[in-house]
Image (tube, rainbow, N blue to C red):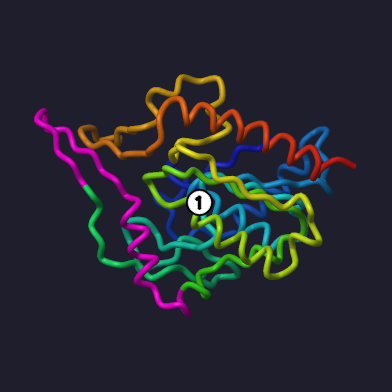
Amino acid sequence: VFALSYWGLETLPQNIDRIPLEYFLSAIEVAKEYPGAKADKIAVIGVSRGSEAALLVGSVSAQVKAVVSVVGSGLSWPAWDVWTEPSWTFADAGVGYVPWANVQSMRRTYSDGGVEVTLREVWTETLRQAPAAAIEAAAIQVERIGGPVLLIGAQDDQVWPSCPLSDIAWGRLVDAGHVGRFPLDGRECYPGAGHALNPGYVGLPMGSTILVERPDGGVFDLYGGSPQANGQGARAAWKRTREFLEAALKR
């Protein structure tokens, strides 16, 4: 397993802003050199915005044999806090993205000065306002992925609507006959779970997965769900992902 950082560190972009897909392709070459690695059995997993990268890389690389998108999106979105630039590039060209709408997040202020922010409506309204042609231009060509795809969403995701966004990718897979060619293709929308639904959280306390404090303090992003639903969803997603990868990558 190779966990790849692609933004936020000192030597990397400080935001998801014009990140070359070639960076991920070079990481695949590194991973192939690991002792015991199966160079012909490469899978990519992405979570949240990282799911865009995972699906995009799978769509442009014949080396990728399976992709898992967790609380992700079948559309590419603009660079965070920039909004007028692509998040991703390929061959020196920007990847198409949904044009951003001037929509305010929903905020609730408490008596102690704390602020709770819900972002889901920002993405939902931006998607509603976008012209059909723009949506098509931003749609990730998941049908070009040369292996099965697993799409995992959370019904009560309050960061963005990961189930409907995953359904966009699923619709392309179905319409293109990808599901017929790769019967392991699948989608899951875990009821009651929030954006913190993540197989990586299995075995960890789930109490802090509903609200996540921003680094500067005082502002909490609402992730949604409940500790019980997030825990159940994470365990189910972990089991589903393991079974999917075992089937997709077995010789």
Q: Of all residues shown, which one is farthest toward the right?
A: 251
Say which amino acid is labelled 1. Cys
Describe residue 103's horizontal placement relative to residue 200 as left or right. Answer: left
Q: Is residue 162 or residue 34 the one in the foreground?
A: 162
In the rendered image, residue 160, in percent from the top left (x then y), is placed at 40, 51
Q: Of all residues shown, which one is farthest toward the bottom?
A: 133
Residue at the spot of label 1: 163
Which residues are drawn in magenta?
A: 107-134
In the rendered image, residue 168, in percent from the top left (x then y), is placed at 55, 62
- Residue at 76% over, 49% down: 184
Q: Is residue 115 magenta?
A: yes
Describe residue 44's horizontal placement relative to residue 62 as left or right. Answer: left
- Mark 1 nearby-residue class (10 Å; few <14, some 14–19, many ≥20): many
- Residue at 67% over, 38% down: 241
Q: Of all residues shown, which one is farthest toward the left?
A: 111
Q: Is residue 68 magenta?
A: no
Q: Is residue 245 or residue 227 the one in the foreground?
A: 227
- Residue at 23% over, 49% down: 106
In the rendered image, residue 68, in percent from the top left (x then y), is placed at 64, 47
Q: Quick one: quadrant of the C terminus?
A: top right
Q: Is residue 232 or residue 109 the one in the foreground?
A: 232
Mark 1, secondary structure of its residue: helix
